[in-house]
Amino acid sequence: AMADVVARHLLETAPGDVYVGSPPLGFTFGLGALLVFPLRFRAAVAMVEQPSPDNLLAAVQKFGGTCLFTAPTMYRNLAGLVARYDLRTLKRSVSAGEPLPKATSDAWFAASGIRLIDGIGATEMIHIFISAKGDEIRPGATGKPLPGYEAVVLDDDDRPLTRGSGRLAVRGPTGCRYLADTRQRGYVSNGWNVTGDRYRIDDDGYFWFEARADDMIISAGYNIAGPEVEAALVGHAAVKEVAVIGAPDEERGQIVKAFVVVAPGYAPGPALAKELQDHVKQTVAPYKYPRAVEFVEQLPKTQTGKVQRFVLRQQE
């Protein structure tokens, strides 16, 4: 079912395709992209044992890769390397695993000429269930439910809404069940799989990611979505990578704190921190700016390249 929905409809997988990507086969993203999808439609896979940015692009060039699969953080790194490689065979690029900021989508499009296909999936649902392709892509939005799936947002009383903001809930032809596990009771509500993400549905039916439930920062009574602040910071030329969390604060309960990896050519320090803070104030809203900015050499990540914000929270 996931192959016929994602590979056939979204990616239009064909026997001539060569898939390249970074997600391990043990993760849902990699299971589909690098095993199930190409097997289902007789395509090929160029496996990259050490998927560094250069190794991924080299594999696309060497094996004639037609579709690339990796996380948003990796695409931001890849954008600066595209000019070194011959990527003329590449037709599609798929992003999943963490929210895709519009700035990253635009940077990859400017470098490669290919608009990123964003998608949200979940281990419990096997693979991607909301996405968009081609002219239907709206940078910054995840997309619409794929064929066979329904998606809504739940309000505080668990009522399903087709417009507005709330907890994302989905149902469709795929799904897993927690066996002998208390998480099953919280994950399924009235037949809906509740993912733990907060989304907004606009008037055209597009789904816009707001935050993971645990990425919402409550500071002095304000609800602030960490990913929104991250998206604003990524739009600044001095920011190579960033992760935003809520840090404990006696006065405000929490404050917005940004961990920033600086782009080449920029010097970390108080002056840059203030410049980034002012940038957020002007880009989103003054009350959402990071009151603390810490410059780091690298961010903690999973094997798939997803930033581990919980590690940063534990450090705080």
Image: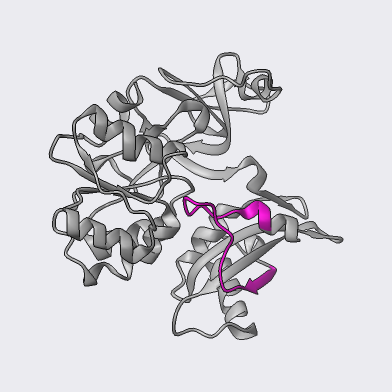
Q: Is residue 256 left or right of residue 243?
A: right
Quadrant where the image shows the N terminus:
top left
Q: Name the outermost residue toward the right.
A: 250
Residue 301 on the magenta span: yes
- Measured from the top left, where is residue 156 in percent x and y? 67, 28
- Residue lying at the far top of the rendered structure: 190
Q: Position of residue 108 (x, y in %)?
A: 31, 60
**Drawn side of residue 206 relative to residue 156, left or right:** left
Which span is picked out in magenta? Answer: 291-311
Marks counted in the figure total: 0
> Which residue ends up furthest to the front in the rendered image?
49
Where in the figure is residue 231, as x and y percent of width and height?
Answer: 49, 59
Q: Could you say where residue 168 lies in the image, as x and y percent from the top left?
A: 54, 31
Q: Residue at x 27, y 52 (%)?
A: 115
Most common secondary structure along the magenta stretch: loop
Query: Can you say whether 164 is above or below 301 in the image?
Result: above
Between 153 and 57, the one lying in front of the other is 57
- Corner quadrant of residue 194: top right
Query: What is the quadrant of residue 290 in the picture?
Result: bottom right
Confirm whether the magenta stretch covers residue 128: no
Identify the residue at image location x=26%, y=65%.
Answer: 111
Tell me, yes or no, if residue 180 can be seen here.
Answer: yes
Q: How is the image coloured?
A: one colour
Asked whether residue 204 is in view, the answer is: no
